Image (cartoon, coloured by chain):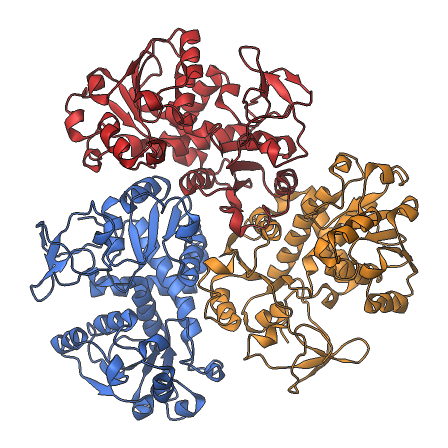
Chain colours: A orange, B red, C blue
Amino acid sequence: MPCGDLLDLNDCSVTDWKNLIKLADDIRLNPRDYMHRCEGKVLATLFYEPSTRTQMSFQAAMLRLGGQIIGFDNPVNSSVSKGETLMDTMRIVSNYADIIVVRHPQEGAARAASLYARCPVINAGDGGHLHPTQTLTDLVTLSTVKGRLTGLRIGVCGDLKYGRTVHSLLKAMSRFEGNRFYLISTPELSVPDYCKEILDNAGCPYEEVPALDDCIGELDVLYMTRIQQERFATPEAYEAQRGVFVLTPEKLQKARADLAILHPLPRVDEIDPAIDEDPRALYFTQARLGMFGRMALMLRMLEDDITIHSEREHHLHAAVCSNPRCITHTEKYLSRSVCKDENGHDICLYCEEKC
Amino acid sequence: MPCGDLLDLNDCSVTDWKNLIKLADDIRLNPRDYMHRCEGKVLATLFYEPSTRTQMSFQAAMLRLGGQIIGFDNPVNSSVSKGETLMDTMRIVSNYADIIVVRHPQEGAARAASLYARCPVINAGDGGHLHPTQTLTDLVTLSTVKGRLTGLRIGVCGDLKYGRTVHSLLKAMSRFEGNRFYLISTPELSVPDYCKEILDNAGCPYEEVPALDDCIGELDVLYMTRIQQERFATPEAYEAQRGVFVLTPEKLQKARADLAILHPLPRVDEIDPAIDEDPRALYFTQARLGMFGRMALMLRMLEDDITIHSEREHHLHAAVCSNPRCITHTEKYLSRSVCKDENGHDICLYCEEKC
Amino acid sequence: MPCGDLLDLNDCSVTDWKNLIKLADDIRLNPRDYMHRCEGKVLATLFYEPSTRTQMSFQAAMLRLGGQIIGFDNPVNSSVSKGETLMDTMRIVSNYADIIVVRHPQEGAARAASLYARCPVINAGDGGHLHPTQTLTDLVTLSTVKGRLTGLRIGVCGDLKYGRTVHSLLKAMSRFEGNRFYLISTPELSVPDYCKEILDNAGCPYEEVPALDDCIGELDVLYMTRIQQERFATPEAYEAQRGVFVLTPEKLQKARADLAILHPLPRVDEIDPAIDEDPRALYFTQARLGMFGRMALMLRMLEDDITIHSEREHHLHAAVCSNPRCITHTEKYLSRSVCKDENGHDICLYCEEKC
């Protein structure tokens, strides 16, 4: 099992998280102390699908630590991604770079990449599976703007069914004491059962709320997410329900004065731009804090202060993953391994779907 | 009104220009004195249409000051430009960068961008509107190769109707004493009336000249520009007139020994490559000097020595801009503001077309 | 004739090669001694066709010397490559950069580029013509992993007819004493006569071998290359012959314990991934060593310790090159020059095909 990779934020302990948050905070307040810390280091950003915002955040983070950057931003332009296995690309690029950030449209691709890289790998999003530095961004932001990660009343609003960002946030925040969740969505886009199980197992109170209006006055944090209109049967169905999801100045009138409004960005229509100048609108601050979170993460990974590793038990039996979006379907050389999840079920090592 | 942006070179005073030219000169002569001046700074080059030459000039400029670079070169590859407003992109990127250079196909886009960025913005070309660092390049070049910006006999040749480069150059050079202009073109592609008004108001003598041959012997400076064959009704019409516009070794025989031949590049057919080795051919030197001009500009903007701001009067009434290429037509959240031009007419704040 | 370019590794003496290898070795062992050596220098990588691996190798090399990078990776995104001659692009970019690496699909493009650049140019592959830093990579690798460049039994396997990598390797290794070559291929893809002439002239023993199995036990070095299935009349023809070319764990059982298996990468099917963990599999090490070779090369070119120049005799008579892939067919301004090859034949100055 490779050490030193960041594939899933849950492979780190809460103590690791707190240390990262503390370090991110110190970097933000004392940037000059860190501007030479990664001198001589090279980051490769290998983006098998474009995600300019995330890529620029990582690049700026490494440059502000004194390191340098190489990489590609689109497979169409890149000979690396044509006719070469992910395995070979990782082996070659880890000769050039000291740390690799991978973004890939297939689920489990980051774990597959980490098996062959000879340097630390960070998952910058593998399909609908995980995006741990977004969750790290959210933790750094909550800690910075609310001063704590405990005892918060957190509303999450939007597409709670497909939004991996929300699932990861719920899982992460359920590990801190005293948080209460308001799951604001329509029945069609409500949180999947496995997320509710996580909250139940952690003993976190939560309630499903049919519209933003119904709970906005109680919230410390409102985490908005994108609604993809394609999720709805018809444009009319979307229009009929958008009142549930869209944050407007009118709705905000009922909110607390210290509400923190977050959004992973990019937004489409979910937040009226008229709110942007409200001091409670902290989604651009969140993007900024994410850069400091990534600086903290890369610094610790490169300085070997941190060893992130999964403690999962592996079985090397020849299971074929049934998830069609799993990386094992295109990268045939991968050993088809399963491991146990928290409940003892066999899951694919890569995409973590049940086998 | 944002301060510290460079959207239009005419927002700077002639004194500002002279200081920039002097600084560019010092950087060129003493590059080692400047190689760490922007250490720790990050430039983002956001190119919504490709312009590799301009982008590389800015990138090399920042790197030679000790700074670093991020950005994108093509909207097709970039998730930033898909489904995200220019406003949101600027807010996010200004979290990562200390200075932003924007190139955009729509007129007024740079001003729109500057309203939302939390760091200085440089306009690297917004459609057919403005391209102030090209004009700065031209000023630095004239000052360096002629030793002065006054008392010059300046020929401008080519498409004088649509070429924004020439319009800006005429406007800028009319602010210095004793310059005389030769406008060399066909009637179809002659200088628009508003440029002649500028020259008239400044008291600059000028004459319209039907062919290069007629005045080349009198010139201190010959500024050549691209002819787009699409401007002509037929290929035959172009061929019939190309003698007016194309510089050949034969025509050059009549020129003064100290003529300076400039061109904003890329050239197509306007200058015969046989001239390239002539010491009067200074268009590649011009490209080099442009890099030093950009170094001077970014250095002063980052060190806060310079505050560039428009003194125009703003009216915030709801005018819809009638220019179909204006950024206000696609970025709907922009306030449709008008301001007054030099003659007191209402013009669109963004693209500066009359409303 | 421009000096200081690397267009063809054979323009350097064997002493130059040995010095580069020695320097690459020292950089690899003492990287911190070199991490500021190119401070203030800018590399431009101008890739007129994508080759991400090669581009990242050069970029990482320059960054690890303390220099910086600009450039483009795809002509489709680049305005430089549209409507601008290679000549003008080189003149402009050499204003911004201190050294230029060019990759181009047409043969002879690197030499054409070098005629107009005002800084050193490195050929990173010009069509099917040359790719000298791949050959440098191979020399550095053989020297490092075998401890010598003499007295080696070297098998080359695969498409020996079209593979420029193999041709260059044979030519280079024939300049060292005591090397013996095993040319492993099918008759359809065997080494062209001109390569055999080089070996004959150098007095190097060689034999043509019909299958890998027949000689693998005798080899010190096995250099594998890509087979392009398009070279075969039918997929069945390829399948019938693949046993000749494909390296499997079974075949490897007969090999010496100190065999070095190399491959220029990317591989397709020629090497079974089951071999990758074998200590004799050194193709990923080779990619790593290539970066150090490129560091050594750029360092010496920038520090002016090395002057590489062709000693060929030039005739400036107006020959039109008959090679349709030659750069002279698209860049019309190039003087159609011929020079003499080793045998006194007239060859095109650019692509080196016979005229």
Q: Say above or below: B3 vs C1.
A: above
C32 vs A64, left or right, is left
Pick the front one: B20 or C245 = C245
Numbered circles on residues, count? 0
Percent coordinates x, y for residue A106 in the rendering:
61, 67
Q: Quadrant of residue B33?
A: top left
Pick the front one: A9 or C46 = C46
A165 vs A187, left or right, is left
Q: Say above or below: A15 vs C39.
A: below
Percent coordinates x, y for residue B312 in the rendering:
59, 16
Percent coordinates x, y for residue B173 in the rendering:
39, 16
User: Is residue A229 visible to us here?
Assistant: yes
Quadrant location of the N terminus of chain A in the rendered image: bottom right
Which residue is located at x 78 percent, y 40 percent? A281
Percent coordinates x, y for residue A146 in the rendering:
83, 46
Which residue is located at x 39 percent, y 88 percent? C257
Pick the front one: A81 or A134 = A81
